[in-house]
Amino acid sequence: MDKWILINKFILILFCALEYSKGNMKDVILIITLMLIYLSINAVAYIFKNKAVRAVILTASFLMFGVCGFTIFSLFVILLPVNIFELVDIFKFPWTYAISFTIIPVFFIKGDLFNSYILTTSLSGCIYYLLRNLYSKVMDLIIENDDLRKKNYDLFIKIDRNDEYKKDLKYLSQLEERNKIAQEIHDSIGHTISGSLMQLEAAKLLVYKDTDRAAGIIVNVIGILRNGMESIRITLRNIKPQSEEIGINRLKVLIDEKLSNSNVRSSLVYKGNLLEIPYFYWKVIYENVKEALTNVLKYSNASNVRVNIEVLNKFIKVEVKDNGRGSDKITKGLGILGIEERTHELGGKVIIDGSDGFTIITLLPKEVNK
């Protein structure tokens, strides 16, 4: 803003110089010196950031050239309004004060000078008023931007804390699960093995003295160990999740993580018996969906994406469809080529359609020769 005010003052001085050159050019050195002094004083005023110092310098300029305007060169009075606008702004006076002060010289000037004064004062007033409004809006935007930056920082802090909480919760869940497994092993398997060892020790002592009794103990231990093995199988069956549970849950986590920092909404739909999907299929499905979601974020400009898994009679169908801009000409980059390669290794097929949004369909046969 200061730069534009100085440019305005320079234009006024240039106008004074042009008007002076049309006259009799009396006291040339004095007039030029005064013009240079005016420019120097007003330039120095903007070197100081302290408003009080600036106000003193601008007041001196106003008084000096007010006197010069009425004694030496009358056209200098057109320089006064800009100083008035600045002083009113520094002291935070209402703009009615600025209008009142700029009207006062009108009563003391006449002729062509009157027209020049009115014209330059109006233009300078409009320029200064527009600059002040623009500066005020810029400052408001800076303050608003600082507030947004602070809120953004606070939000990141909360996100970090939330991530830490999730990590702690996950770790605690793992500890609890490990403790549960250890307790079940101790209760079911530990007691079985320790009891069996004690009976085998007894059978060892009786094997040469009382063969029948030792044989009975051994038979009993065999029964106990057989029951223990069954208990182990039941425990492992309860602990180990089904393959489809691992696959579909990993897919849900993948979609949430991939789209968490975007405005893209997602949905996951699955139909049919997921138990019919082999474990090694889930890895291909996971990688293909991951690559498809990456393409959605990079190229599609979509607001919604749908992941659909269907277990059909002869095929397993995995479809990733978005509502983005699509593409009439499909360009196969490394991502799509990777999807096709993984799918073809299992004897499957990939269908790509860009006519209505963008769709990638993976078809995998239920029976694979591996």
Image: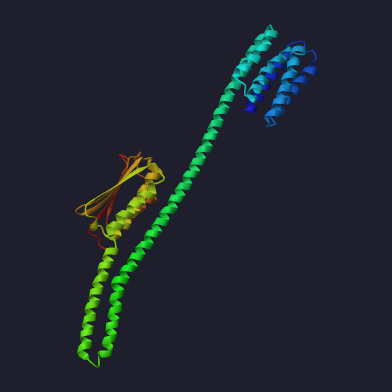
- Closest to the observer: 137 or 305? 137
Residue 282 on image: x %, y %: 30, 57
Furthest-top residue in this view? 111
> Number of marks in the image?
0
User: Quadrant location of the N terminus?
Assistant: top right
Reply above or below: 244 against 77: below
Residue at the location (66% across, 22% down)?
87
* Residue 156 visible in image: yes
- The residue lying at 75 percent from left, 12 percent from top is 70
Q: On the rendered structure, is 236 left or right of 120?
A: left
Image quarter of residue 142: top right
Residue 82 is left or right of residue 314, and the answer is right
Q: Estimate the x, y position of residue 126 in percent, counting from the top left.
A: 59, 19
Observer-nearest residue: 1 or 56?
56
Please tell me which residue is depicted at 39% across the width and 43% down the height of the picture: 299
Between 72 and 311, which is closer to the camera in this rendering?
72
